[in-house]
Each structure stands twice: as C-alpha cells, then as structure tokens.
C-alpha cells in the first residue's frame, strides 16, 4: 500500500528530511515524562524548562545533534538511597530522554539549573538573504565541446 504524505507533490524537491522529522515528532509526542514548558522570552528568545526534581547537574546531559536538542537524565543511585525506606514515592527519578527538533537559525545560548528546573535558553537568529541571480547561458554547440591540442575550438 502506498503511503500518501504532504510532500508527495513533485513541486516539493528535497523535503525528505522534513518528512522524517515529522515521523520522529509523532513518535516522541506521546512521551510525558518529565514535564516541561516552552516559553517565549523577548522577541527572538525561547526557553525550555524541564522539571528534573531529584536529579543533579551530573545526572543530566544536554546536547545537539543533527538539528535535534536531546536532554537526557540518568540518576546514579547513592549509598543513601539503599538505606532509605519510602512509605510513598511520588517524585520520579527514572531515566528519561526528551528530544526537540530545532528549526534552522535556532542557537542554544546556555543551560542552567535552578530549584529542580533545568532551563535551556535559545535564540532565533534572523537568516541573511541568500537570494542570487542565475545566469542563463546560450546552449553549447557540438563544436564548442571539441578542443584541439593547441586549445583552439575546431
């Protein structure tokens, strides 16, 4: 069975990567842990805030690969953890990975932790125009393609 997508039109050239990005987004959309916020800060600023109660900075990793921001957390058990007896454990500290697809022109400015919240600041950089004129040339004739040893056209 053939799968129809938004980019099936012959007018969309080279958009395979975007289609793959949409597929990855659909898969990650169902992940609810840990909770996070995305907020606008200023005209071109964005901030992702992830609730990481119970994690230290050493337990967290933030990296960018192929236009994808990956935030992961893996808490290392300590000697204190084995001695503790929980009657109720409501603060989840399970391993996680959150992925965000970044648009072209988004730059990560920094990451910081405050009161159990991991904040990642980003800025949208306005792209410079890369428009250029393409020169239309006359068709090459057969004779122009043949050059003799002395560099003259035959």
Image: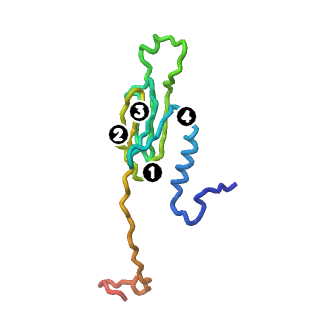
Horizontal and vertical percent position of residue 4:
64, 56
Give the percent coordinates (x, y) of residue 42.
Answer: 38, 46
Within 10 Å of disc 2 (Cα), the crowding (few <14, some 14-19, many 20+) is: few
State the separation of the CA atoms marked 3 and 4. Answer: 16 Å
**From what the image shows, is residue 41 above or below residue 97?**
below
- Res 144 label: none
Kind of element beneath mark 1: loop
Do the residues bearing badges 1 and 3 touch, measured as CB atoms within 8 Å? no
Residue highlighted by disc 3: 118
Answer with mark 3 or mark 2, whichever residue precedes in sequence.
Answer: 2
> Mark 1 or mark 4, which has the lower sequence index?
4
Residue drawn 54% across the image and 51% down it: 20
Dot 2 lies on which element?
A: strand
Q: Residues within 10 Å of mark 3 (few under 14, many from 20)?
A: many
Quick check: marks 4 and 2 in contact, CB under 8 Å? no
Residue at 38%, 57% (x, y): give it: 127
Q: Of the residues under marks 1 and 3, which one precedes in the sequence?
A: 1
Q: Foreground: 83 or 39?
A: 39
From the top left corner, tell me how far across and down residue 132 is, in percent: 38, 70
Name the quadrant of the C terminus. bottom left
| Residue that badge 1 annotates | 103
Q: Nearer the viewer, residue 44 or 70?
A: 44
Q: Is residue 76 left or right of residue 2?
A: left
Distance from Cα at disc 4 to Cα at disc 2: 24 Å
Identify the mark at residue 110; answer none if there is no mark. 2
First reached walking from the N terminus: tag 1 or tag 2: 1
Q: Earlier in the sequence, mark 3 or mark 4?
A: 4
Residue 32 image label:
4
Please give left or right for residue 58 compared with residue 51 in the image: left
Q: Secondary structure at mark 3?
A: strand
Q: Position of residue 142 (x, y in %)?
A: 44, 85
């Amino acid at each position: 069975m053939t799968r129809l997508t938004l980019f099936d039109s012959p007018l969309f050239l080279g958009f395979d990567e975007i289609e793959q990005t949409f597929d990855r987004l659909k898969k990650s959309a169902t992940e609810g842990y840990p909770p996070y916020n995305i907020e606008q800060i200023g005209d071109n600023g964005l901030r992702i805030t992830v609730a990481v109660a119970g994690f230290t900075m050493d337990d967290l990793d933030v990296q960018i690969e192929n236009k994808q921001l990956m935030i992961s957390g893996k808490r290392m058990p300590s000697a204190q953890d084995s001695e503790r007896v929980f009657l109720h454990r409501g603060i989840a500290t399970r391993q996680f990975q959150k992925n965000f697809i970044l648009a072209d022109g988004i730059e990560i400015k920094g990451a910081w932790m405050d009161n159990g919240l991991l904040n990642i600041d980003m800025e949208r950089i306005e792209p410079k125009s890369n428009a250029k004129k393409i020169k239309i040339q006359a068709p090459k004739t057969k004779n122009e393609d043949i050059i003799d040893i002395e560099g003259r056209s035959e």
